[in-house]
Amino acid sequence: MKIFDSIIGFVFLSSTLALTACGGGGSDDGRAGGGATAILNGTAAAGAPIIGQVTVKDSLGNSKSALIEADGSYRVDVTELTAPYRLRALGRVGGRSVKLFSYAEAADVNGTINITPFTDLIVANAAQQIAETYFDSQTATSLDATVVAEQEAALQDKLQNVFKALKVSDAIDLLHTAFSADHSGLDAALDVVRLQYTSTNVVTITNLIEKTQISDDITASNDNTAPLPASEAKLAPAVRDTQAIATLTDTMTQAFANGLPSVSAIQDYFADDFYETDTPKSAFLTDITTDPILVGLRFSAVSVSDLDSDMGTATISFYTSIDGFIDPVPINWYVARDSDLRWKFKGDQRIADMYFEFHCNDNNQNDSLSGGCGVNTRVWDEDFTNNGTVSNAPIASAKVSIIDGNDGSTVKAVIYLGTPANASAGDVQVYDEALQAYQGDWKAFGVGSGEVDPSILLAGDIIEYQLFTEDLDISSPAAPQIASAAIAVASYQDTLRYAPSTHGLYPQATDSTLTAMGNFTLGDNLTIGWARASGTLSDEVLVEISDSMGNRIEVRDSSFLPDATSTIIAASELDATAASNAGLDVNATSYTLLVRIFTRDQITGQQHSTDYTATIPGPAA
């Protein structure tokens, strides 16, 4: 059973680590602080803290970056950079990718500079071009401070009804006033207002609660659009509900702060019909209150969407962290208000466990092949009673469609999944048209048969899963299809968080690990050490011992923190008893030992792994 897998399987290093990338030096003239330490800091948020990093680019094209803290705050040392500065926050909010911009002068050093959708629009209007284009420009062009101030005031005029309804102070400066990403004040306004380019130079400003809109042409310096319609009667309840939902997640954080809570201590935070990846409330609560790795679990960067205060329903997206390590994969749940007006978790309400992510793997570091990248996707169905069939039939096939996120309808690619003859019922795996065989959860990148073209995959695309209880139709092996009479028993959608990398950042096993593998016999401890590629953090280690017939011991270890570089697989996991339980051939003279070391990109979460193999003695050696 895969419970809270994104928490247990991987936790991501937060801003205790900093990324720095300098583009070169410059003269001392005009440098921030004149030799003293100079800092740009503020809040990077869009209704919730941005999970990602801030990059500051100076007037000479040099840049420095730092990770954003879990609360949305950032801090970049710009001592060696030359004012003025262009700022970019790149990351995710609520499971969607965001790229927002801001601007700072020398006078702003050691003061507050926020990075939000509001500052992005201010920069765009001041530069009269899309803020990203201005940031990326190789020609350093300073913005007129007077024009920046005028555009900040103009945006405040457009949002005056929202600010009045939320009681945001008239004295606020959208660029420079410090605020907390806690769903109050300015952050509450970011919760209820969405800014989006609807044409090349026109931004639509939407009141998400009342569905009102105005537009802003960034090329028109005197774009005197009427203020965005908004009312306290509608916005105030929405903000109160958003804050109540955030308090619910804070309460869960407190429950795990100093140990594991009892089921009775947290069960009232979960609705009776809570369901998470094929797991009902009782089993889910048992699992998360008995797993010691969850001590210190924190819920952070909570984003609320689809809020209906009248109906008492909403969708939330949040990130989890343990020991300061933030998992880059968001958790998306439904929440609802009960008859006592208390908000409760409802989980993802999915009748099966499924995932879609990108992965680069060096299949065998022992050979000369360079490895390759592709998609990992799979469906597990462990409870057949919730599939809506009279006979409690398991999920047997699935269709995973990649849909254009811009129009919401164009299908870019389709991956078919079915249940292999030798697999357990409910283990629905990827079918490869070229090999005409099942390939676990793997679909390689490429433009040939059985591959997915990585160039079509963009952040914001929709991943749609359709689940069926009928077997996959492979009567035409090179052209699999869903059985003609099949009707989907469930359909779900996720949003692609990032475009894939097609370049592997492979971890490397230490020489002592290779020696240990070469000398290994059943019943030994196995110590595995590795070095990570730059920009990655440790995720998991897989150890397999297999015979020629495909029987295998499989051990997965993810009990270490992301900065770890070694782990020990206990002898009891790899002894004769484990071999017997796995059905390994007792007459074999040799077995194959496989070690796969997984790491993840510390910004996107994409997996990178390396395989190592060795031949070890079997019982009949």
Image (cartoon, grey):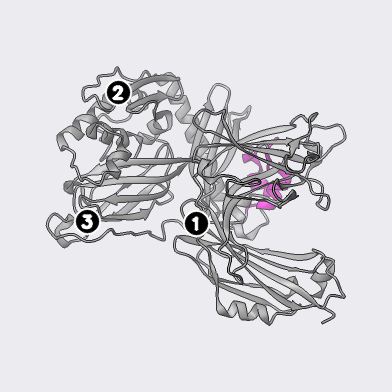
Picture coordinates of residue 89 (x, y %)? 36, 45
The crowding category of the residue bearing disc 1, from other C-alpha atoms within 10 Å (few below 14, some 14 to 19, many at least 20), is few
Q: CA distance from mark 3 to mark 2?
A: 34 Å
- Mark nearest the camera among 3 and 2 is 3
Picture coordinates of residue 5 (x, y %)? 63, 51
Picture coordinates of residue 41 (x, y %)? 29, 50
Picture coordinates of residue 86 (x, y %)? 26, 45
- Mark nearest the camera among 1 and 2 is 1
The image shows residue 463, relative to residue 323, as above or below, that is: above
Q: CA distance from mark 1 to mark 3?
A: 31 Å
Highlighted magenta segment, given as a residue range: 261-288
- Front-most of 525 and 71? 525
Sooner in the amino-acid sequence: mark 1 or mark 3: 3
Q: Looking at the image, which residue is at 72% across and 48% down?
A: 429
Residue, disc 2: 158
The crowding category of the residue bearing disc 3, from other C-alpha atoms within 10 Å (few below 14, some 14 to 19, many at least 20), is many
The image shows residue 372, relative to residue 247, as above or below, that is: below
What SS does tag 2 mark? Answer: helix
- Front-most of 14 and 19? 19
Residue 549 highlighted magenta (yes or no) = no
- On the question of residue 17 being in view, the answer is yes
Question: Residue 81's mark?
Answer: 3
Q: Quadrant of residue 401?
A: top right
Residue, disc 1: 503
